[in-house]
């Protein structure tokens, strides 16, 4: 894409553009991304039990709040990962950056799975967990920019939306698999076993799969070779100074999506802690949400190739803004399996469609030389500021404002994001080769 995008100009794709990545390469890109998000969301799924294991601060509510706070700490290193690994991908290529992020997530996951409880090693336990969360945040902060850039740059002409939507779809896979593991573990263990060691099992499962992701990523093609000669610091400075408007709009574009995703991840804790539903049922709701996210993201990517990015961003978000409060009122009035699955599925459907189209548009706003850095910065900062604080905020708000607090928070953030969606240009037909 040329610099003319900054003035609102849109350039057509060349008619003879050929795909540069295969379906196997797409699978490699999303395999690592899915594993990284799987590890990240597993922490949210088992926050109640992790809180009891590492943060025994006096009562269940305070322990949960401490656990959720450390979950949020994992977002603090996302901007650092976005800056360092994003610029590395624009300098050295998408492939080495994507291998690096998988290596980092491996270290973080191993620490979470193997650290003894507070009862065994005292204060060392929460400190180790904190460090592992920071490593995971660093990895994910640097993951989205390179992998989304590779998908956008290597997609066949007219299919960028579908290819790039695999980014959100892979997050749905992560939630789906995490939810399935949660259901199986919860269904086959007692409450005491789950709290003692059962929550560690899903982390161990991902450690088995990580070598496969590394092997697949080593076979990836490269879609970008740096010809600018700029250092990483110069690349970041160019993005910040030359594309400030799109950085700000992109961050606001992700606001509601980040909040919706974290509310979805929090639904397990919400169902157990607030609605007093069984753990197995709560995990089933998460599983359904992940499945619908996977399907809806791909549908939105396909439709955005035909009808444009903005239509698929705006309309699902408008519908969700209108429906979310009535949905939570229904769930609170009838806290059972049917309403939990209905509410979780509906919010996941609408949020995923809007979020997938948004994540397609963001890298299309940036030129090739800075695409990874720009996308990484937007994603990491947006998710850190808004997604990283969501679970802590709604946990606190539930005690202050009642059970509808998550819905009200989604409404407020959605209104801000809708304004940003209106302000950005349509990017479906930009030339991403420049």
Image: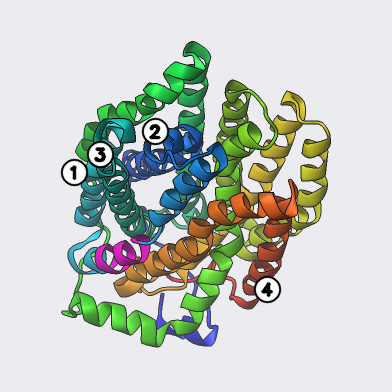
- Percent from the top left, x then y, of residue 370? 32, 73
Callout 4 crowding tier (Cα within 10 Å): few <14, some 14–19, many ≥20: some
Q: Label 2: state its secondary structure.
A: helix
The residue where tag 2 is placed is 53
CA–CA distance between discs 3 and 2?
Answer: 14 Å
The residue where tag 1 is placed is 218
Q: Which mark is residue 111?
A: 3
Q: Which mark is residue 419?
A: 4
What residue is rendered at 43% in x and 38% in y?
A: 56
Contact between marks 4 and 1 (CB within 8 A): the answer is no
Q: Which residues are magenta?
A: 77-86
Q: Nearer the viewer, residue 277 or 250?
A: 277
Residue closest to the far front: 58
CA–CA distance between discs 1 and 2?
Answer: 37 Å
Relative vertical location of residue 17 with respect to residue 236 in this rendering, above or below: above
Q: Quadrant of residue 79?
A: bottom left
For the N terminus, the quadrant is bottom left
Contact between marks 1 and 2 (CB within 8 A): the answer is no
In the picture, measured across the screen, residue 316 lies left or right of residue 163, that is right
Mark earlier in primary sequence (3, 2): 2
Mark earlier in primary sequence (1, 3): 3
CA–CA distance between discs 4 and 2?
Answer: 42 Å
């Amino acid at each position: 894409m040329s610099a003319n995008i900054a003035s609102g100009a849109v350039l057509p794709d060349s008619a003879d553009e050929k795909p540069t990545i295969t379906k196997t390469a797409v699978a490699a890109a999303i395999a690592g991304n899915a594993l990284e998000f799987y590890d990240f969301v597993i922490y949210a799924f088992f926050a109640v039990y992790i809180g009891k294991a590492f943060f025994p601060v006096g009562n269940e509510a305070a322990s949960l709040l401490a656990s959720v706070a450390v979950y949020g700490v994992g977002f603090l290193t996302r901007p650092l990962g976005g800056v360092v690994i994003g610029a590395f991908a624009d300098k050295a290529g998408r492939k080495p950056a994507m291998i690096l992020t998988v290596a980092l997530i491996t270290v973080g996951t191993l620490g979470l799975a193997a650290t003894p409880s507070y009862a065994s090693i005292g204060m060392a336990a929460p400190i180790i967990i904190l460090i592992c969360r920071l490593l995971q945040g660093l990895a994910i902060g640097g993951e989205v920019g390179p992998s989304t850039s590779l998908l956008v740059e290597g997609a066949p002409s007219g299919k960028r939306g579908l290819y790039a939507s695999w980014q959100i779809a892979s997050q749905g896979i992560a939630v789906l698999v995490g939810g399935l593991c949660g259901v199986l573990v919860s269904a086959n263990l007692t409450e005491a076993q789950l709290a003692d060691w059962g929550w560690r099992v899903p982390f161990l499962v991902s450690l088995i799969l990580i070598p496969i992701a590394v092997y697949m990523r080593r076979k990836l093609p490269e879609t970008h070779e740096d010809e600018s000669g700029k250092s990483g610091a110069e690349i970041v400075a160019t993005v910040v100074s030359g594309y400030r408007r799109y950085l700000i709009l992109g961050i606001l574009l992700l606001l509601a999506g980040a909040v919706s995703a974290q509310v979805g991840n929090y639904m397990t804790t919400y169902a157990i802690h607030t609605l007093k539903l069984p753990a197995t049922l709560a995990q089933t709701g998460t599983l359904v949400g992940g499945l619908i996210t996977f399907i809806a993201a791909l549908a939105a990517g396909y439709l955005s190739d035909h009808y444009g990015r903005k239509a698929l961003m705006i309309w699902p978000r408008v519908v969700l803004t209108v429906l979310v409060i009535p949905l939570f009122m229904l769930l609170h009035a009838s806290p059972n399996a049917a309403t939990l699955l209905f509410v979780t599925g509906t919010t996941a459907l609408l949020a995923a469609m809007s979020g997938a189209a948004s994540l397609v548009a963001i890298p299309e706003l940036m030129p090739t030389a800075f695409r990874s850095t720009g996308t990484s910065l937007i994603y990491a900062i947006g998710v850190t500021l808004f997604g990283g604080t969501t679970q802590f905020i709604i946990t606190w708000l539930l005690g202050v404002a009642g059970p509808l607090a998550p819905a009200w928070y989604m409404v407020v953030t959605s209104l801000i994001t809708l304004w940003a969606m209106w302000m950005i240009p349509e990017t479906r037909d930009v030339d991403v080769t420049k």
